[in-house]
Amino acid sequence: MQRFDRVTVFCLLLGVAVFGIAAGLFALGPIPDFVPVLVLGAMFVVAENQLADIRSDIGASASAMLSTAAVVVFWKQSPLLGPLLVGLFGGLYWPHIVARDWRKILFNSANFALATLAAALVFGVLAPANLSTPLVLLLLALPTGVAALTVDLALFSIVVRLATGESLPLRTVGATILQSYPFSVLGAYLGLLYLDYGAVLVPLFVVPILVARQTFSSYLALKESQEAAVRTLIGALEAKDPYTAGHAERVAGYAQYIGEELGMPPSRLERLRFAALMHDVGKLVVPNHLLNKKGKLTAEEFAAVRLHEEVSVEILTRIDFLAPVAPSATSEAAEFAPVADDRGQPIEPHIVAVADAFDAMTSTRSYRKALPQQTAFNELRKNSGKQFHPRVVDALIIAIEQRNEQHGAGHEDVVHHADAPEAGTGSAGLGDLLVDAENGSEQKAGR
Amino acid sequence: MTIARRLFIVFVMGAIAAGVAELVDPGGTSTALVILGAAIVAGELLVLRPAERAPLPLSYAVVLVLVRITSPAEFMVTVFAAEMVAYLFRPERSEWDRVWLTAIRLGAAIAAYFVYDAAFDVMRGLDSRAVVLTALAAAGVAEILVDELLQVVRARRLYLSTQGRSADLALITSGMLMSVGYKGIGGQEGIGLWGPLLFSIPLLAAWYSFERLASIRRTYEQTIAALSVVPELAGLVRPGHAQRVADLAVSLGHELHMSHRDVEYLQAAALLHHLGHLCLDDPEVRGRAIEPSEVTDKGAEILRQTEYLRPAGDLLASDTASVGSQILRVASAFDELTAGDPAFNDAAIEALYSGPGYVYDPRVLDALERVCSSDAKVPARV
């Protein structure tokens, strides 16, 4: 409650500040023309409503473009108040209006207004008398865009800190500036065109950007539903072996933790998650009675079970996106060999191996009950640098401890067979790490 | 060679050619024409790939700049030279495809030029700003229409989709802006080559989005296809069965005028129609043989669990009798009989018509006969 109040107070203060500035500028004049404020404001509203579901850096590009355009359009006529008024439109996000979330609307409007005002100030100081050479625009768009982004990010990080106590990761700021720079240049030119031709060219300008947006959001939607479909499919197929049901999804989750901890970019995380989800797909070719067999397998049966890794690789290789990390499915490739320089080698197989081993130890299998989380950690640490990649092991342990999660004995979602032995040599979860209860020595399952 | 490397080579070659043009003809228009020609080559490498539509090259936008600033001879030379260079860089494997695409692009560009001129003549004397914009829009539409028409002739299939239309719009509007930026309109001066450069930004953003969309679709299709071979790897069905049934089912779906979306579901259902087998116990364990309907019902049960594949699951379930599920039954039974060997096609069709034990839908069987007898291979993949 305390935090909520602080955020509200901050938003109100911001709103009052913007109102005060606007009132002062009104008193000083000149008052901007009505039409360009509405046209550019409407573009801002459209852009914000279209883009809100999209990655923030693309959203930043659109607002950079529109604020720079507003700055140029009003530069001669109403250099400060015009851009400020256009910026106010940026907060009109339909879902917020429907939800009557006035606080967010207030914050966003004030934020965009102040960011655009900052851009206008920088532009006003730097701009020469004659704008129409492209080089001038190219040079001016950078500081103008940076000014708007700086104010935007600063205010946003304050409100995030007030609301959640977390600070915004700043490492992406450079990339955001680089990405939005071309759009600032484009916005500056849009401003010039507007001054020359009026609103005629605006629709032409908006269409390709809207198409890009629309396509990108349908990409995101499709990605989500297809990923869900593959997840369900794998889960349903896995269900034939009650001991490992949910295994792939959990391994994908742990792999995601590790990838995030190691600072992987989103596209690589996506591939990692997908590869982890599919890593055991070859197990589907193993007959059920072998998977669930208690006790030792015959040599023949064992060979049939072993085949599944090859099948997994074969299947992963058929998917272009996953082919580079297809070895994730074999225990050989995942085996950590301490070499001086492992750069250039994909780390994904090691991640899948550690995630796989951790889940195998912390869930009940046909050959033994789940181990406590701490035992699993100790096992991973003991083999860190030998069987497992040390950085990956550390990343998993840090990620799980940071999240205060508990897995393993007593914390399983579903325990399928309460009568599983406390310990034993199993066959199903290949690559599992076992702790033999009698002598405490560990061995790789099925080896 | 990756697209990025091809683009780099085009960029370097374009820069060198522009330098030479500037030396030979300082201050003339040939430098700009060389650069725009290079832009056409680059635009041929970057294509918008909306679903259900032949890919559209970004070069169509650059053509709208050329139609305004060149004489007919200059236009022909520039476009023809650019297309010849682009021909060498085209990533398509087959020679035939490359020739076809070059012809389509040339046809579309020439159509754009003549339509622009004609539209300009018709509207002589009107407000020049409106005239230029309308003529440019007409040229853009002409380009797209000619492309579409020639693609239909080539693939013998009409592509229609909203996604395709939005790609058209993005191309035409960007091209118009590039053109206006280059030369200006209504007495206003343009900014030369900066115009096309600046207005390529939103178009490139659109291209990027379409690429992402196409890549996620490809990944998904490959995932389904990869899962489809699992029953084969497990030795439960003949190798290649799933893919053959899927290809045949897609052909039959087109033959029976199913919608694109329904054909996609049909394809997924066909690819995964043996998946349920993996979840059934072995006959030795359960003590009796596995019925085919058990396999498809189990598969349907699995697919119906996912929002995205539910319609495909419905096609598999034995309690449905849609055209799609009839097609699946016919395609699967046909492949069981022929095992992919066309020598058995006629005998298999005969056997299905007489249908001992099960009566197949005669409409689907007629379509099967037509598909098998047509020499021209209908493109199987959607």
Image: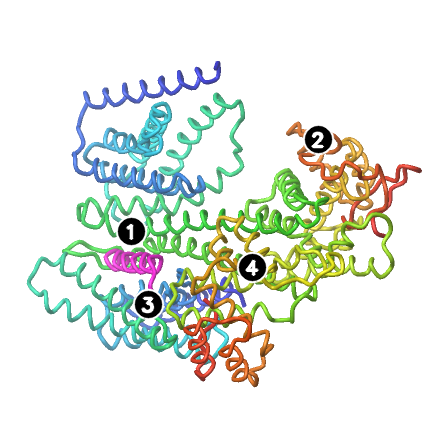
Which residue is more in the foreground, A373 or B10? Answer: A373
**Which residue type carries mark 2?**
His
Label located before the other in sequence (4 or 3): 3
Q: What stretch is highlighted in magenta?
A: B160-182
Mark 4 burial class by Cα count in 10 Å: few <14, some 14-19, many 20+: some
Q: Mark 4 points at which residue?
A: B224
Indicate whether residue B230 is drawn in magenta: no
Label located before the other in sequence (1 or 2): 1
Subunit of mark 3?
B
Q: Mark 1 points at which residue?
A: A207
User: Residue B310: image x %, image y %?
Assistant: 49, 52
Separation of marks 4 and 3 at Cα, in angstroms: 50 Å
| Disc nearest the viewer among 3 and 2 | 2
- The image quadrant of residue A330 is bottom right
Mark 2 burial class by Cα count in 10 Å: few <14, some 14-19, many 20+: some
| Disc nearest the viewer among 3 and 1 | 1
Q: Residue furthest right?
A: A439
| Disc nearest the viewer among 4 and 3 | 4
In this view, B5 is above or below A185:
below
Q: Dot 1 lies on which element?
A: helix
